[in-house]
Image (cartoon, rainbow, N blue to C red):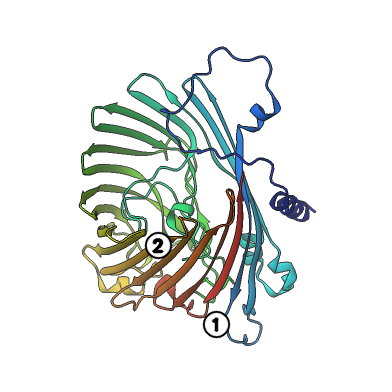
Amino acid sequence: MIRELCACLLVLSSASPLYAGEIDPFGGFDNIPATGKEKTKTSENDFLSHFSGYSKLGTSVNVAHHAPEGQETDWRGLSRLRTELQLEADYRLLQWKLFASAKGFYDFAYSLNDRDRYTPQTLDSYEWETELREAFIQGALTEDLDVKLGRQIVVWGRSDNFRVTDILNPLDNREPGLTDIEDLRLPVTMSKMDYFRDNWQLSLLAVHEHRASKLPAFGSDFHPSATPAPPEKNPANNLKNTGLAVEVQAVFPGWDISFYQANLYTDQITIAPSSPPVQEHRRINMTGVAMTAAQGNFLYILEGAHLRGLRFLADYSTDYARTDLLAGVEYRGFTDTTINLDLVNRHLHHFRPELSDSPEFPKRSETQAALRINRTMLHDRLTLSTLLIFMGEPGQDGASQRFTAAYDLADNWKLTGGVIFYQSGQGVMANIGDNDRVFLELRYDF
């Protein structure tokens, strides 16, 4: 009954948007108007101005799957028909901002295709969901000191394609490749304090909540194995497990740089040799740096991270260290076109042969490459995008190619469509080569 009620609410929200104003939930304090004396009466329009969000309807059709064998799930044809609603509340009083958002979706594809075809894990993960997103209070304690408390997203690093220093928030990776990283981050509860002085910014963070990334469920077309993964053991959200992180950032004409230090639980999984085995999250140390430099039509990106405290089932008693390096370049010399290329190398130090059989798929050296091309047309109403990702040399660990067109139908309406192709590889990219699909999405922002 709850599932059907959520579905009805989402459908109604897609057809009847409440309000057509846009509010930037991540805006700073420069544009916060002084409210003066609090009003005793609030008009309807003033009340609605504190709310925004979006509703959308999206569908995907699988185009490469073959007829299943035996009791396997038939993934041919319609794989997604999802209606989604996100509501945001933004209230500002003097120098303080209160923000909260919640999201829910219901996917009709599973009922239309017969729910008995799918594993319980697939239905639990993909059919419907409601969750609290960001919820925080933010304000200025002094002219140079800001504070932000609550569930939030904090982005480290500079790359839009790969994560090197960006370790604070887990990701929603249930449908790999369909969405960019900026739309995949999951908020966690943190306390953040920012101190500003001239061109410098010092950020101190305490991470109180430990969330795992959302991975493909057992039985889904993106799950890499024919057997379910061991259950996850998440660390308790208590004072002892609180993660600590520091960022020092400097911005100068033409270039910027950030230095990072963190000791916290991340979304990287280790399978512990218990009985029965469980997936656990290890507390690791990370030291990193990220910078960008602009020169003419070029923007150069560099990121580096050294992670300590990694463990793997095949040699569980040993702590390993890994160094990740990213180099990228973005070119804007063509009219209405940007071209971005990112290259990553992840090197696991003191690699031992027995690690090759560990179920976490560690590698001595792993390379990744991404080529992104964006072009706007028709007075910026049409955006064409190409994203090519290759894992390993040359793509031996898997690859994907996504081609997208997004068209602004009206001020708040956007229609997005495209196609994505997959090539299977090793590790987490195994057995996904048949997942090629065409997708279409209609979105309304209010």
Image position, residue 135 (x, y; %): 54, 36
Amino acid at circle 2: Arg
Compare residues 414 and 64 and report the one nearer the observer.
414
As displayed, is residue 257 above or below residue 70? above
* Residue 131 visible to the viewer: no
Q: Quadrant of residue 394?
A: bottom left
Amino acid at circle 1: Ala
Q: Between label 2 and label 1, give the one nearer the viewer.
A: 2
SS of the residue under disc 2: strand
Distance, label 2 to label 1, CA atoms, is: 28 Å
| Residue visible at 61% across and 74% down in the picture | 61
**Residue 384 horizontal side relative to residue 45, left or right:** left
| Residue visible at 44% across and 52% down in the picture | 182
Image mark for residue 64: 1
Image position, residue 272 (x, y; %): 43, 60
As displayed, is residue 27 above or below residue 108? above
Within 10 Å of disc 2 (Cα), the crowding (few <14, some 14-19, many 20+) is some
Q: Quadrant of residue 332?
A: bottom left
* Residue 413 visible to the viewer: yes
| Residue at mark 2 | 375
User: Residue at the front extreme?
Assistant: 379
Within 10 Å of disc 1 (Cα), the crowding (few <14, some 14-19, many 20+) is some
Compare residues 413 and 418 and report the one nearer the observer.
413
SS of the residue under disc 1: loop
Mark 1 or mark 2, which is nearer the start of the sequence?
1
**Residue 174 horizontal side relative to residue 317, left or right:** right
Image position, residue 145 (x, y; %): 35, 24
**Residue 244 horizontal side relative to residue 353, left or right:** right
Locate the C terminus and report the quarter of the image it occupies: top right
Mark 2 in CB contact with mark 1 (< 8 angstroms) = no
